Amino acid sequence: MDDTLSQIDLSKALVALLEEHRGVDVVALDLRGLNAWTDFLVIATITSSAHQQGLERHIKDFCHEKGINILRVSPRLREQRHSSERLIIDDEWRLIDLGAIVIHLMTEKTRSFYELERLWGASDVVYKSSSSSRSSSSSSSNS
């Protein structure tokens, strides 16, 4: 993923993949020049734990097909309840780090709380779902 154009195309391909599998309010942000740790963020809202796991599987399959190394996937948080020995799995936010592209799969509650689009408001929007209910102060270039 060294070529900038291919990074943009790859971001758009990941957006298309997420939308194809019912990711909600999908957006890709261009962070080049704003930080040193990644070039693009792709953010999608998930509707359930099963949805998150399915999207993650599709992303992993896509990366395998394209020969893209996944550098890191955030671990699932597990906590024990006081009165029970059951493990509770927290699938509110999964981060998949491809290096130049970082993918965030978030529940609506978590996405609204952290407001990554607002945090990175100085970034250019590479893609934003036409069905997106989110507003952005950056210019959008859907394609």
Image (spheres, rainbow, N blue to C red):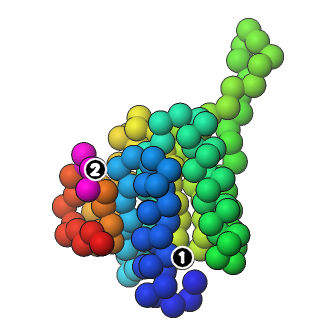
x 59%, y 35%: residue: 49
Overall secondary structure of the magenta stretch? loop
Q: Is residue 24 above or below residue 122?
A: above
Task: Give the magenta-colored segment's residue range.
Answer: 130-134
Look at mark 2 in the image and give the residue it sits on: 132
Q: Quadrant of the N terminus?
A: bottom right
Mark count: 2
Above or below, 66 against 56 in this view is below
Extreme residue in the top direction: 83
**Looking at numbered disc 2 in the image, what kind of residue is underneath it?**
Ser
Residue 135 locus on image (x, y percent): 21, 52
Is residue 9 found left or right of 53 in the rendered image?
left
What number is the disc on residue 100? 1
Task: Name the secondary structure under disc 2.
Answer: loop
Mark-to-mark CA distance, 1 and 2: 24 Å
Magenta region includes residue 105: no
Identify the residue at the far right of this view: 85
